[in-house]
Image (cartoon, rainbow, N blue to C red):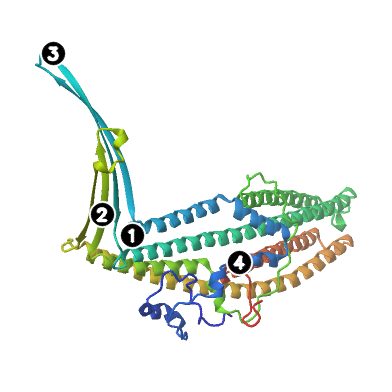
Amino acid sequence: MIAGAVSLMALSACNVTEIPKSKMKEVKGMASDSGSDRWTATKEGQSGVDRAWVKRFNDSKLERLVAEAVSRNPDMRVAAENVRQAQQAAYLAGASSRVMANVGLDGNRRKNLFVGFPFGGSQTSNNFGLNLNVNWEPDLWGRVRAGVSASLADMQAVEQERRAAETSLAGNVCKAWFTLCEANEQLGLASEGHALRLKTLEAVRDRFELALQDEGGGASELRLAETDVATSLALKAQRQGEVEAAQRRVELLAGRYPAAKLKGRLKLPPIPRRPPAGLPSELLMRRPDILAAERRYAGAGMRIKEAKRAVFPMIKLTGSTGTTSDSLSDILSSSFGVWSIGSNISQNILTGGQVKGEIAMRSSRDRQNLAQLQSTVLKAFGEVESALAADKWLARRITEMRKAQKLADAAAGSAEEDYALGNVTLLTVLTAQNRKIEIASQVALLRRLQLENRVNLHLALGGEFRTQKHGK
């Protein structure tokens, strides 16, 4: 059981944007025993989600596949470009508070024709100009700074979303790999079942050829045995198709061409040890979806501040200098220069409700992001609780099914011996054999489900298990 939600709400790994203290109680309502009144940067949040949990399955090939998928999957490149775009947006957000300058060079050539003079004629003149304009808006009220902080928070949220995509990809690769391993194991069981039914068919055919009807050598039993052989072949073909489908799934996730050439393990790996008791809730602070939701909420608060600062006066300082000459060689001469320096102050008086409406809209988004953060946190706790409960019940089911598997194996062996002695009918033998294969198949399925659930638990906790006392 996860121990308390005390520290979960201290989520801000990057203190670029502070959450207002007045809003903290709304989020911490889900962790009422918390005594903190501010967001604090935590070691868990700074380290972020890890992929060390993949090593827990003790499969080096799986580890290499996860690393390959993270580096080659096209979706990860899309996520990386989203981060770059968010970084540029954050940079552009502060452009208005930086000094801007532009330079221009122009020139023209003019020819005048003179009509009516005794001999007529024309005159050609050249004119060149060079000018430099500088513009700067001091951020006296912090409006631009608030916008920059909001953009930085958005950028951090996008980065966390990229990490969330990477985490999800790693989990999907693991699950697809386990599906491939199970498909190989199921194919092995289907092949074993087919060989078993061929052996039974030979025994029935021998009885039939010897015409030992009194000992169970009738034609009906021969047809029944042949039917089971054909059915086992159909099941084997089905399992082979499932193996190829699983191969293509893993190859696609790894960024490879889906050629169905990847060879998986012939059997599922053993189940790792169960998670230790007393897992701290701080582990959830590594979850990128929670960190992203917190950053969105922090950014929304700064957007409100930015909108409110829009009512204050805006001051712009401008300056320009330039030269003009009819000779290009004199363009930089101070004798032809002109310059000007000026400033202007403007303040919104009547905006048709635009500023007020913008504040109201951003306040609504702020409340929306708060609700989203609360929903994300609650969902995270639900995922952990569900995964822990499922792990317990799956383990119990596997234990009971293994007992049933041993009994089914013994029953199939006894039925074959009794049939050889003429004590049971062929139907009893086939039923026992079918049950043996079916239970083995169910055990493989449950083991794969338990492995997938263990992946879900790691993702829900943000990575590897760590105990509260020892950090392991």
Q: Amino acid at mark 1?
A: Ser
Q: Nearer the viewer, residue 183 or 97?
A: 97
Residues tagged 2 and 1 counted as in contact (Cβ below 8 A): no
Asked whether, in this view, residue 198 is left or right of residue 292, the answer is right
User: Is 397 located above or below residue 109 in the figure?
Assistant: below
- Residue at image position (87%, 58%) is 215
Q: Nearer the viewer, mark 4 or mark 1?
A: 1
Q: Alpha-carbon distance for marks 4 and 1?
A: 38 Å
Disc 3 or 2, which lies upstream in sequence? 3
Pointer 3 local density, CA inside 10 Å: few below 14, some 14–19, many at least 20:
few
Tell me the quarter of the picture where residue 370 sits.
Answer: bottom left
Q: Amino acid at mark 3?
A: Phe
Q: Alpha-carbon distance for marks 2 and 1?
A: 13 Å
Q: Nearer the viewer, mark 2 or mark 1?
A: 2
Pointer 4 local density, CA inside 10 Å: few below 14, some 14–19, many at least 20:
some
Label placed on residue 97:
1
Q: Considering the numbered disc 2 on the image, is that residue within a helix, a strand or a loop?
A: strand
Residues tagged 3 and 1 counted as in contact (Cβ below 8 A): no
Q: Which residue, given by chain and number where applicable, does mark 3 sit on?
A: 119
Q: Alpha-carbon distance for marks 3 and 2?
A: 51 Å
Q: Nearer the viewer, residue 405 or 382?
A: 382
Q: Which residue, given by chain and number where applicable, does mark 4 sit on?
A: 50
Q: Amino acid at mark 4?
A: Asp
Q: Nearer the viewer, mark 4 or mark 3?
A: 3
Q: Nearer the viewer, mark 4 or mark 2?
A: 2
Tell me the quarter of the picture where residue 54 sits.
Answer: bottom right
Q: Which residue, given by chain and number where applicable, does mark 2 sit on?
A: 318
Disc 4 or 1, which lies upstream in sequence? 4
Question: In the rendering, at what x and y percent does residue 444 appear?
Answer: 71, 63
Q: Nearer the viewer, residue 416 or 44?
A: 44
